[in-house]
Image (spheres, rainbow, N blue to C red):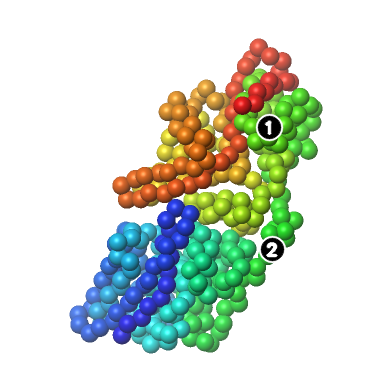
Amino acid sequence: MLAKTLCYALSGIDGIQITVECNLSGGLTAFELVGLPDMAVKEARERIKSALRNAGYEFPSDRLVINLAPADIKKESAAFDLPIAVDILACCKFINPEAIRDVAILGELSLDGLLRPIRGALPIAISARADGVKTLILPAANANEVMCVEGITILPAQNLWQVVSHLSGKTPIQPVKTKSYQELLGERTYPADFINVKGQSGAKRALAIAAAGGHNVLMVGAPGSGKTLMARCVPSILPDMTFEEALISTRIHSVAGSVPEKGLLTVRPFRAPHHTASQVSMVGGGIHAVPGEISKAHNGVLFLDELPEYRRDVLEALRQPMEDGFVTITRVSAQSTYPSEFMLICSMNKRRIRYDTAHFSMH
């Protein structure tokens, strides 16, 4: 018995369509998983077995072969748990194989069958829509993240039983209710608002000019003069993000696993890495070439407090991404390009000036 469904892997801030194939045949009990899976995908076997049994389904005792195609693309994360489990149930005739052939399914399974949120739900939903996929099933915890995506039916599921019940035609899952970008803008709140800054008229004027012209700023002042507070308030005076800018910024944070609970980013991001940050954490990298602070600050503000304390190699690494507006990260197992257009605000202490004032320069 053969069953197929669709899933997605991440490549940078884009989704790549993956076909999950399951073949159930006679022979000794086996569970073979092929298609270049990483360790998190290989460990899906034990999660799926426990989830199926705790959801009331018997795990087959025949030979199972799972193929993730195309085989030359590295498969990462636990988002393949749910499509593999659904394929197995289709092979066991709990689900009609035709009902899942054109449906994209993603989700990490708990041992009790509940669905955990996944990284990259928004870029996957956008890529699925571009590929012509009509229906996408994903964990309910990712619903807020994708509520702005129109043109595709997105079904939020709480657990494995709910997915099976929907695909078998018993209890349909209600699709995510989409919201317009203007509605989301009306619900936004700023963590720090420029209107609450008292005094500092010269400094506020300098920051307003910098925000209007997209200039970078260096603030020099005594400790406690308000440099950090005013830097945190800058996103509140920047122009509203367009819908396209909000999508790009949210896709970056989705891949990095740092999307807020409200979902789509409607406030320009503010990133303030500690001065001990490494070059990899600032620019991006690691085994899977994940985005760094400069990409998370895309369309927003990157704040470097205590500028002289940052390592020289970290500061030098900012030059090219700031000039090009993007950064390309190349590793042995991955290569990704992330946008990196941001307003840079730096601060440093100078104890010889008045305690209640700060000097500003724009570049």
Residue 161 horizontal/vertical position (percent): 48, 78
Image quarter (top left, top right, bottom left or bottom right) of the C terminus: top right
**Residue closest to the eye, 62 or 51:** 62
Density class for disc 2 (Cα within 10 Å; few <14, some 14-19, many ≥20) is: few
Of the 4 image quadrants, the one containing the N terminus is: bottom left
Would you say 121 lies left or right of 66 here? right
Task: Say which quarter of the image contains residue 346.
Answer: top right
Label of residue 210 in the image: 1
Q: Position of residue 142 (x, y in %)?
A: 55, 63
Figure check: 268 above or below 244: above
262 to 357, vertically: above or below:
below
Q: Amino acid at mark 1?
A: Ala
- Give residue 180's mark: 2
Q: Which residue is farthest left? A: 28
Residue 357's mark? none
Q: Nearer the viewer, residue 161 or 153?
A: 153
Residue 22 against residue 321 in the figure, above or below: below
Residue 170 makes an appearance in the image: yes
Q: Amino acid at mark 2?
A: Ser
Q: Is residue 81 above or below residue 287?
A: below
**Residue 65 rendering spot, x and y as whole percentages:** 27, 75
Q: Are marks 2 and 1 in contact (CB under 8 Å)?
A: no
Label 2 to label 1, Cα distance in Å? 30 Å
* Residue 259 percent across, percent down from the top left: 56, 53
Badge 2 element: loop
Residue at image point 33% right, 60% down: 73
Q: Is residue 257 left or right of residue 202?
A: left
Question: Residue at position x 56%, y 82% from top?
Answer: 172
Label 1: element kind: helix
Question: At x 32% / y 50%, what residue is drawn?
Answer: 333
